[in-house]
Image (cartoon, rainbow, N blue to C red):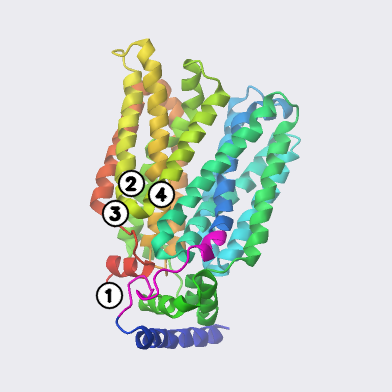
Amino acid sequence: MRGRHADAYSMYKRGTRDYINAYDKEQGSVRSLNGVSKEIGNPSWKRSFLYILVASLASFLYGYHLGVINETLESISNDLHFNGNTMAEGLVVSICLGGGFLGSTFSGLIVDRVGFRRAFQLCALPMIIGSSMSATAKNLWGMLLGRLFVGTGMGLGPTLATLYVTEVSPAYVRGTYGSFTQIATSLGLMSSLLIGFPAKETEGWWRICFWVSAVPASLLALFMEFSPESPHWLFKKGRAADAEAAFEKLLGGPYVKGAMAELSKSERGGEAETVKLSELLFGHHRKVVFIGSTLFALQQLSGINSVFFFSSTVFKSAGVSSQSANICVGIANFLGSFAALLLMDKLGRKVLLIGSFSGMVVAMGLQAASTSSLVSSSNEVYLSVGGMLLFVLAFSVGAGPVPSLLLSEMFPGRIRAKAMSVCLASHWVVNFFVGLLFLRLLEQIGPLVLNTIFATFCLVAVIFVKRNVLETKGKSLQEIEITLLPPE
């Protein structure tokens, strides 16, 4: 088998120059770096749009399972007889993080082995099984096992969605399409909150909330059967003919040769070799992986999860019910995500990141100021609520959607899947420790100092982005790779 693989790969390598030569003869010198002839313009965004929506179901499920516990935890703890056990309640909420870390860690390996279509279906499977186990749980252990299964799918989903959207989108709308994953996450979160509202009044409603999540997971597995595989993955595996067919489905016939030629230009050899972890951490790609891991770490150290956790309490002090609070936060998150969709390909990724983290500094400063003794009690409420909504809005415009999209663009095709899994693993680890230590730090040092720390991390993020992040707006994946990793 090894010999057959080597033969197929050598044929693939010999064919790459043929694509470039054929395209050069046909288009002459009128070829842009986006792999599209200037004479025929950009490919239609409509051809890939439906496939982007299908992939975004993974992000919708991620958001849904993040929020499904919010309104249902009290009913779950009563029915499963662990009410008042804060450790058990915390485990039900946080065990998904353990599953998410596992799913994220192995996501790159899974994609490289089986491709995106099968990986999406593998992502949907534990979500279907886990939600069914949670819906039928008779005790705490059944619920925890179901949440662990769901968490594994949650770890796979965001990575797969981001990578797939990046690799199948035309360059001129890649940022817009990349924002779809954040919007889908926001819609999933809002859906779980809306569906969960009757949970406190209707006995057993929480079980329906978990059953409902099996529907989009099943649709994801079904629709992926009819979606095209990533041409980049096919080409990397030496399946050039299949890559051509995928490009024709995604872009249209007139753009296939140009896309294949552009894809071939970044081929540097070694695609058939296994990418080792040591190569990502200490080799030629260590700087890009460092940038990615740091961006995800700063995203979580900004305090976004603590804001979501503390939102109900802040709104309650202002006389607003927890349900209304969740709706307000959800709307702010959705509006910011929609703004990112409109601005991603106009202003660029770097501008949105800097503006987003800067806004978060101001918002967290308002929340810190609200806890100061210098602020009157009447103004404290306005500063807290206003600062919280501004923080969520600013986060969802840039710091939320941009890092995943940006990094999937910056990583070369050969290491993209595994490098993303390494960076997202850092996301889950930092996320876990922030969630673990937040309440203890709040008790020990108080909200003023804690919010100031979060604001400082946001400021560090602004400086880090200015110094290290490359703008990728409107550039093909191959052009970005050549810019970051010039031939030696």
Callout 4 secondary element: helix
Of helix, strand and loop, which one carries label 3? loop
Q: Which of marks 1 and 4 is in front?
A: 4
User: Nearer the N terminus, badge 1 or badge 2?
Assistant: 2
Distance (Cα) linking label 1 and label 2:
29 Å
Percent position of residue 170, x then y: 44, 65
> Residue at (38%, 67%) from the top-left corner?
477
Q: Give the range drawn in magenta.
A: 30-51
Mark 1 or mark 3, which is nearer to you? 3
User: Label 4: which residue?
Assistant: 342
Three-letter code for the amino acid on which mark 3 is drawn = Val
Residue 487: mark: 1
Task: Find the residue positioned furthest to the front.
Answer: 39
- Categorize mark 2 by other alpha carbons within 10 Å: few (<14), some (14-19), many (20+): many
Mark 4 → mark 2, Cα distance in angstroms: 15 Å
In the depicted structure, whether residue 344 falls above or below residue 378:
below
> Residue at point 68% right, 28% down?
198
Query: Is 35 a magenta residue?
Result: yes
Q: Name the foreground residue: 185 vs 1.
A: 185
Q: Nearer the viewer, mark 3 or mark 2?
A: 2
Residues tagged 3 and 2 counted as in contact (Cβ below 8 A): yes
Mark 1 crowd level (few <14, some 14–19, many ≥20, 10 Å Cα): few
Residue under label 3: 469
Q: Position of residue 305 (x, y in %)?
A: 46, 35
Q: What residue type is labelled 4?
A: Leu
Q: Distance between the residues labelled 4 and 3?
A: 21 Å
Amino acid type, mark 2 = Leu
Counting residues from the N terminus, which is met first, the one under dot 1 or under dot 4? 4
Q: Can you identify the residue that label 2 sits on? A: 353
